[in-house]
Amino acid sequence: MAEKASSSGVIFRPHFKTHQSLILGRWYKDAGISKITVSSLSAAEYFANDGWKDITVAFPVNLREIDLINQLAKTVRIGLLLENPQVAIALDCELKYNADVYIKIDTGYHRTGLMPGEMPVIKDLADRVQNSNHLNLAGLLTHAGHTYHAPNAAAIKNIYAESTRILNDVKNNLSYLGQDLILSYGDTPSCTLMESFENIQEIRPGNFIFYDLMMIDAGVCDPSQVGGIVVCPVVATHPSRNQAVLYGGAIHFSKDSILIDGKRGYGQMVEMNAKGWHKPIPGAWLVSLSQEHGILEAPPEVIMNLKPGSVVGILPVHACLTANLLHGYQLTDGGIADYFIGN
Amino acid sequence: MAEKASSSGVIFRPHFKTHQSLILGRWYKDAGISKITVSSLSAAEYFANDGWKDITVAFPVNLREIDLINQLAKTVRIGLLLENPQVAIALDCELKYNADVYIKIDTGYHRTGLMPGEMPVIKDLADRVQNSNHLNLAGLLTHAGHTYHAPNAAAIKNIYAESTRILNDVKNNLSYLGQDLILSYGDTPSCTLMESFENIQEIRPGNFIFYDLMMIDAGVCDPSQVGGIVVCPVVATHPSRNQAVLYGGAIHFSKDSILIDGKRGYGQMVEMNAKGWHKPIPGAWLVSLSQEHGILEAPPEVIMNLKPGSVVGILPVHACLTANLLHGYQLTDGGIADYFIGN
């Protein structure tokens, strides 16, 4: 991803909300990355304390956290998301140090952000930022999260084309400001499938560090590219119904699921080997999760080889939420990596 | 619940997996409770360190945690769940101190446990426990989790009747052992709706300390009985689509949902007041959750009164998973309560 960003001449500002780990973060540093994205101020603080100096918080400003915003703005280059002129005014009143501002643009996902049809509001917001004491209008930012629901690779590439066109239209409408705005673009599906990044200046993918069943299901990656599984102890077997009970439930995986032949799947069992894991086992799925229990349903020959006390590897449906719950990593080289525990 | 257990002459061993807090646990202690249930050994350790001396771990024994089992068995009365004779043998070999054993019986939920038709295995397991060095056969335990999916109160009461009948049948079949087995029964729906507890010796409800939307939806409780909400900052409003964006997503609520008029709901907004909160607001629902974002959809007059920086109260769908993610409590009297962070 770093090489692809570099050859396209765009800034690579990976989203750290997926892994949330200082150790894994340093792998990016070793690859020459110095700018990062996070989704909360507390995570920004966690990484700032490890030496990161240029951090975008890709979540609309929560005015109730002004103290932490000021604390961070004092010591690092902090990027904030705005979509409301009144928030810009309130924020500028309370800020004691400078902060970069990205205007959040909704290019079709419709979660949040200003739509291209709301140009008067976008201009009002941009003007208020320009006329503020501490805010620097740095760019326009979008998260094209609708790529996660796109039916295929062509549809994902179309979303990229349409979203970047919208961003450039808005940028052109703001050209009177005389600012060279950065167009910042997110989401792992697009950033994985695009071979180069035209018409934008920054990418912010996060999930690609692990990938997961959702990304396999969407045709974005291959099972061999998945970078993390959950290792679960077996605590009971029920061969008569081709099931085993794992110590691995909703408090470990969260509850995202995908549809497999009309049935909900909460994770797929993988073959494990000395180096970590190999490929997914067909028909071996977590079919239900309660707080601690995970119910694994698998072909008879798989269940027969399981016994309480053994472990199985499970490829998670949604790596970000799973990582958030597990509070740390066992690395395949034997090391341990930390995980930020916060909200 | 304590009074109802007492008047029925059954042991009240509340499940602490819902609240996981030392402070909230002490409220039970103040009500005269001395026996508790947890769902993990690490939680058992957390509460043992606060002085609890009689703890049942209501999850099938994970042999890989034998060191922690021994550490706990040394200092407290620990109850363990077994459903496999081979695990009983392996456990007894590794145990250095005594432990109570409850045989896990599946009375119809079909998550785990031995079914009444598996009497030879149940007897084999009971015999092995009886002939062990460190295991004491204390009782039979069931979690009638199918009450959570029952259509109405009558169906829940029927499940109670059927489950307790099955437990007593199994107990009668084990009478040759000459042990006075405790029949331990779980689940908040039954324990809430039954007026007294016949034919069992112990109850283990947990969720009732808070209740939640699932329990309201199932007719188990009334909104006025709910004991915990999540207070979320508003970070954006979108009046054109009757929505606001809350800082409250899947990493705060988990992803359990209920169906409201055919649409998924992940939480319902409540009116707040000086003492905490009042009643749910009709039509004001969290309609989607991503990692940090919660999308609130509500009538225009509700959305119009929200602005970034204000807060809204959200009644969660599933209190146990929500509490697990939030890592602590703000009490309505101004205090703060801890939360165990573990898996």
Image: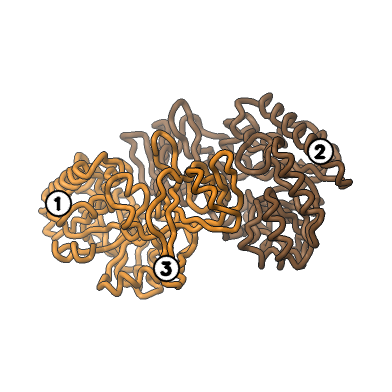
Chain colours: A brown, B orange
- The residue under the point 35% across, 62% down is B16
Q: Are marks 2 and 3 on the same chain?
A: no
Task: Give the quarter of the figure containing the N terminus of chain A.
Answer: top right
Among all residues in the image, which is located at the extreme right? A178
* B78 w.r.t. A220: above or below: below
- The residue under the point 27% across, 67% down is B35
Q: How many labels sit on residues? A: 3
Q: Chain of mark 1?
A: B
Q: Are marks 3 and 1 on the same chain?
A: yes
Location of residue B164 in the rendering, given as x and y in whole percent from the top left corner: 16, 49
Location of residue A36 in the rendering, given as x and y in whole percent from the top left corner: 74, 52
Which residue occupies the foreground of this view, A35 or B74?
A35
Q: Are marks 2 and 3 in contact (CB under 8 Å)?
A: no
Q: CA distance from mark 2 to mark 3?
A: 49 Å
Q: Secondary structure at mark 2?
A: helix
- The residue under the point 33% across, 52% down is B87
Question: Which label was assigned to residue B171?
Answer: 1
Q: Which callout, 3 or 1, points at the residue further toward the start of the chain?
A: 1
> In the figure, residue A174 lies in which quadrant?
top right
Location of residue B28 in the rendering, given as x and y in whole percent from the top left corner: 30, 69
Which residue occupies the foreground of this view, B2 or B286?
B286
* B107 w.r.t. A47: above or below: above
- Residue at numbered disc 2: A173
Q: CA distance from mark 3 to mark 1?
A: 45 Å
Location of residue B148 in the rendering, given as x and y in whole percent from the top left corner: 30, 45
Q: Residue flagged by tag 3: what amino acid is it?
A: Thr
- Residue at numbered disc 3: B332
Q: Residue flagged by tag 1: what amino acid is it?
A: Lys
Q: Secondary structure at mark 1?
A: helix
The mark closer to the camera, 1 or 2, is 2
Which residue occupies the foreground of this view, B78 or B230?
B230
* B297 w.r.t. A80: above or below: above
